[in-house]
Amino acid sequence: MDHPEYQYLNLLKDVLDNGFRKVDRGTGDASYSVFGRQIRFDLSKGFPLLTTKRVYWKGVLHELYWFFSGQSNIKYLVDNNVHIWDDYPYKIYHSKVKSEKLKDITKEGFIEKIHTDDKFAKKWGNLPKIYGELWRSWPTRTGRTIDQLAWIVQEIKDDPNAHNLIVNSWNPEYLYTMATLEDASRFPICHNMYQVNIINGKLSLQLYQRSADLFLGVPFNIASYALLTLILARITGYKPGEFVHTFGDAHIYENHVEQVKEELTREPRPFPEIKLDPTLKTLDDFTPDKIELLNYNPHPTLKAELSVSGGFFDKK
């Protein structure tokens, strides 16, 4: 029970035992929720890519680069055969088929168009005001943008004792009923804020995730932000410390319950390791080929359907 992955497994069990049933008003999908939990991983003791089911590492790596490089169009992911973000742009396209007299195509046809038709991808593959754009080009009232990630790196160099090293993705101007209809983002910002801190020569990162799909999303989020921690530590010249994952609403979707029960029968295996290319020295140096995953030996994949819940809700 000393294996750090038991923190995640115990959280799954907590939700199964104590979760309150909720129903998403937009999709009708039900989930079981608890509120206010935390897990943490010492990154000197292995990389927390969960082992009780196979986590899609290629997706983790390319998604983080997508965020890191400030992109918001899924074409980069589609072109690299990573399809974890397909549903939201397709949902937007499909919602406008009648009003804009668009061709009603399947999701597979939509993704093929994103891959092969640059003009179509530019119009329909974009998800504005999501993580990458807000990390690297936060919009201001004056029209200038703020590169929060670059600011953090410089601030660490200028003042390693700083308490203010925060990157925020929660902008009320574009979210939910706080936004005007034309500005409202169709994607729900879930992992909405992270803070970096330097303690005793080590760089640690804490993520606040206001809404957490524990079975499908959270294993991805753990790996992604742990990798971000390692990269920032390398760039700024510190040893990696902890990745701390703090949750608001942590939930298991009703149609994931059987898969969760299966996962809880499995024993964790040793965590893998990450090897960073020595040429990775600045933010601009990070590309997926600079990261190598070593000794990953997980249990088999457990599949489940993604719920496209949350985000903008049109009362009409």
Image: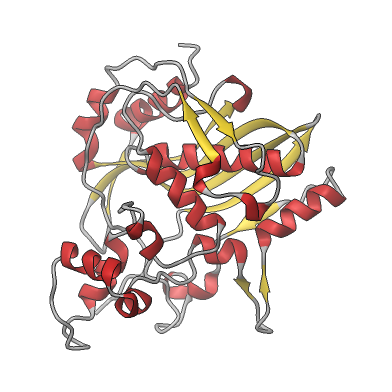
Instruction: Please tell me how many numbered marks the rendered image carries.
Output: 0
Q: Which residue is drawn at 59% across and 20% down?
A: 45
In the rendered image, the vertical position of residue 131 relative to residue 183, given as above or below: above
Provide residue 155's location: percent of width, then percent of height. Answer: 80, 53
**As drawn, which residue projects farthest toward the bottom?**
100
Q: In which quarter of the image is residue 56?
A: top left
Residue 266: give x, y in percent of width and height. 30, 17
* Figure colour scheme: secondary structure
Residue at (66, 74) in percent of width and height: 145
Q: Observer-nearest residue: 191 or 94?
A: 94
Residue 57 left/right relative to 163: left
Identity of the residue furthest to the top in this view: 1
Residue 236 left/right relative to 94: right
Q: In this view, does 161 lie above or below 97?
A: above
Residue nearest the observer in this picture, 219 or 22: 219
- The answer to whether residue 36 is visible is no
Instruction: Give coordinates of residue 194: x percent, y percent.
Output: 61, 49
Horizontal and vertical percent position of residue 227: 55, 39
Q: Quadrant of the C terminus?
A: bottom left
Q: Is residue 300 visible?
A: yes
Quarter of the rendering containing residue 18: top left
Q: In which quarter of the image is the N terminus?
A: top left
Q: In this view, does 106 lie to the left or right of 211?
A: left
172 on left or right of 256: right
The residue depicted at 32 percent of the width and 70 percent of the height is 313
Q: Nearer the viewer, residue 156 or 4?
A: 156
